Amino acid sequence: MTDGFEFCDALGPTKIIHIYEPEIKLRGILVVDNTAAGPAIGGLRMATDVSVTECFRLARAMTLKNAAAGLPHGGGKSVLYGNPKIPIEEKEHLIRAFSQALRGNRDYIFGPDMGTNEVCMAWIRDEIGASVGLPREIGGIPLDEIGATGWGLYHAARIAVDHFDFDLQGARVVVQGFGAVGKHAARFLTDAGAILVAASDSQGMISKPQGLSFHELAAHKEGGHSVRTFTDGQADAADKIIDIECDIWIPAARPDVINEHNVDRLNTKIMIQGANIPCTASAEERLHERGILVIPDFIANAGGVICAAMEYQGSTQSTALRAIEEKITHNVEEVLALAQQQNLRPRQAATQMAEKRVRNAMTYRRFSSFSNAPNFL
Ligand code: NAD
């Protein structure tokens, strides 16, 4: 195991805590990366193969994502070692014990992540009161059900098309991964007049150049079937979705789906990244060389975390949706303007924007090296 200090830099991490209770087989880690903008929000991941390094990387990604989203929250992450599919009573026991062990930390708010869900967040809320992504009955806004991230992707697409000579009305859209993120992105885009020419899931893909019926396809999927068995379209293997000609291609499935072996097959003008890190670095660079506009993941897919932060403030669902619209519209505009002015890739511009916001927030801290203010200590 790493000692946790080799990745310390000017932003953090401010705190790394290891919890170990051998009697009850509890082992977990909390990394609070940076809290200059406010208490850190980040997911609790439960998996058998997590590490301090992974936890730190995820915490840093949350620092930048929350800052890029303009939220009054820093970044953190927690991991619990174990199989998330253990019997529910054992899982509840572990998660309650883990949150109790961390109860003194007022600078971290738990959210759901791989291996945890809204029920786990309710247990933590019951123990220590510091979690988001709760069930509706106790003040939660069910972000996957309302399509918070898809709503943000739609607004990112709305701004991105302004840089091209076509409108959303009639734009041909492809969605890889017709799940919580991809399905709602397709819903909002088709509501705005876009044409869904192809969609996929892990079993396969379905395409139709004249446009798939979103509502019929969503009903088919909700009935427990793969999009591949939808009859009003041409079915094919999942990977074939990369070749479908379109205006907007939305990855909403897995990391690294676009890499140096398949990037040149993409036939789109815009990529709006719904999944986290859907392209390898070299593939994303290749997209830029080809003139394809990429709206990076942590700018485009921040709808979920914005929704969670609004839930934490006690906001209603409609206020949360308005905040997502306003923040993602503003951030995509700012990133594209900065990229244009300074001849940067959108991802570089987004990282620069987020880091600047974190550093600005850090100027208000007692031990700030970024501050220009007189030292009163
Ligand atoms: P989900 O499980 O609801 O949906 C994922 C979909 O992708 C499923 O339909 C699955 O069948 C499909 N899929 C898996 N492998 C595939 C493949 N090889 N080809 C095509 N489809 C494939 O998950 P989700 O919540 O929609 O999340 C999707 C991605 O977006 C993940 O990378 C997640 O980390 C990221 N993300 C989610 C949110 C959110 O609010 N849920 C927010 C930010 C980022």
Image: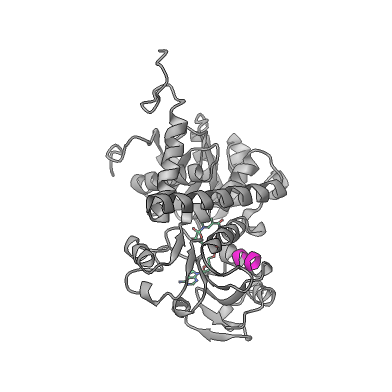
Name which residue lies at 52% across and 44% down: 95
Q: Position of residue 316 (x, y in %)?
A: 71, 45
Is residue 26 visible to us here? Answer: no
Q: Which residues are magenta?
A: 184-189
Of residues 189 and 87, the one drawn nearer to the viewer in this rendering: 189
- Tell me if residue 289 is in the magenta stretch: no
Number of numbered discs overlaid on the protein picture: 0
Q: How is the image coloured?
A: one colour
375 up-or-down from 310: above or below: above
Name which residue lies at 54% across and 69% down: 165
Q: Position of residue 239 (x, y in %)?
A: 44, 77
- Tell me if residue 186 is in the magenta stretch: yes
Q: Quadrant of the C terminus?
A: top left
Name which residue lies at 66% across and 59% down: 145
Of residues 289 and 258, the one drawn nearer to the viewer in this rendering: 289
284 up-or-down from 56: above or below: below
Q: Position of residue 226 (x, y in %)?
A: 57, 77
Q: Quadrant of residue 279?
A: bottom left
Is residue 102 visible to us here? Answer: yes
Of residues 307 and 94, the one drawn nearer to the viewer in this rendering: 307
Q: Position of residue 153 (x, y in %)?
A: 56, 59
Name which residue lies at 58% across and 52% down: 329
Q: Quadrant of the N terminus?
A: top left
103 left or right of 57 in image: right
Q: Main secondary structure of the magenta part?
A: helix
125 left or right of 319 in image: left
